[in-house]
Image (cartoon, helix red, strand yellow):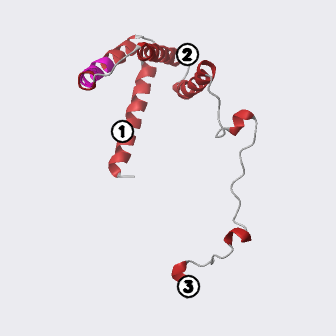
Amino acid sequence: MPLSSLCAVLLAALCHAAWNLQAKRAAASRHFVWLYSAASLAVWTPLVIVVLLRQRPHFGTPQLAALAGTSVLHLLYSLSLQAGYRAADLSIVYPLARGSGPLFAFAGAVLLFGERPGPRFPAWRGARSPAPASRPTRSTTAGRSRRSPSRRS
């Protein structure tokens, strides 16, 4: 991995940890949620305007419903995270909050959209994982030399 990529990942991790620490410290107040929501709006609005003007995407009812639903879910996540930080330690709330998102997404996909786990997730069906591929047998290696071509004499 290039050093610049490693530094970017470490910086992102540091910012993420600092944000959660500040969220924990501000847990008694809802002002924190409002302030970072307003800051996010201020940062992203110019970029969104540029994209809308240049690409002119068409938003129908499904897209607008998805945007509204995502906004509501994000607000609920933020408020429940703050409530969790008021009630318990960061070391308990943070892993539960981060793990609940994928769990809810999976449950929503199954319940709302009828998705079913495929063969990549045999444990969900109660089956064991497939055995690893076996070693080649003599019949599959017949006619091939066991030595690499560069080492033949």
Q: Residues within 10 Å of mark 2 (few under 14, many from 20)?
A: few
* Label 2, label 1: how far apart the Cα atoms are: 29 Å
Whether the residues at callouts 3 and 1 have beta carbons within 8 Å, the answer is: no
| Residue 45 among magenta residues | yes
Per the model, the C-alpha gap separating discs 3 and 1 is: 52 Å
What kind of element bears circle 2?
A: helix
Of mark 2 and mark 3, the one earlier in the sequence is 2
Quadrant the C terminus occupies: bottom right
Identify the element where label 1 is drawn.
helix
Between marks 2 and 3 in the image, the one whose residue lies nearer the viewer:
3
Residue 30 sits above or below residue 94 on the image: above
Q: Tell me which residue sits at (62%, 78%) in the image.
A: 145
Give the side of residue 33 with respect to residue 42, left or right.
right
Kindly report which numbered mark, 2 or 1, lies closer to the viewer in this rendering: 1
Residue 11 placement: quadrant: top left
Residue topped by disc 2:
87
Q: Which residue is the site of mark 3?
A: 152
- Does 33 lie within the magenta span? no
Give the quarter of the image for residue 29: top left
Q: Which residue is mark 1?
A: 11
Residue toward you, 143 or 121: 143
Q: Is residue 28 above or below residue 14?
A: above
Give residue 25's position: percent from left, percent from top. 43, 20
Residue 16, relative to residue 34: is it above or below? below
Q: Tell me which residue sits at (69%, 54%) in the image.
A: 132
Disc 3, SS:
loop
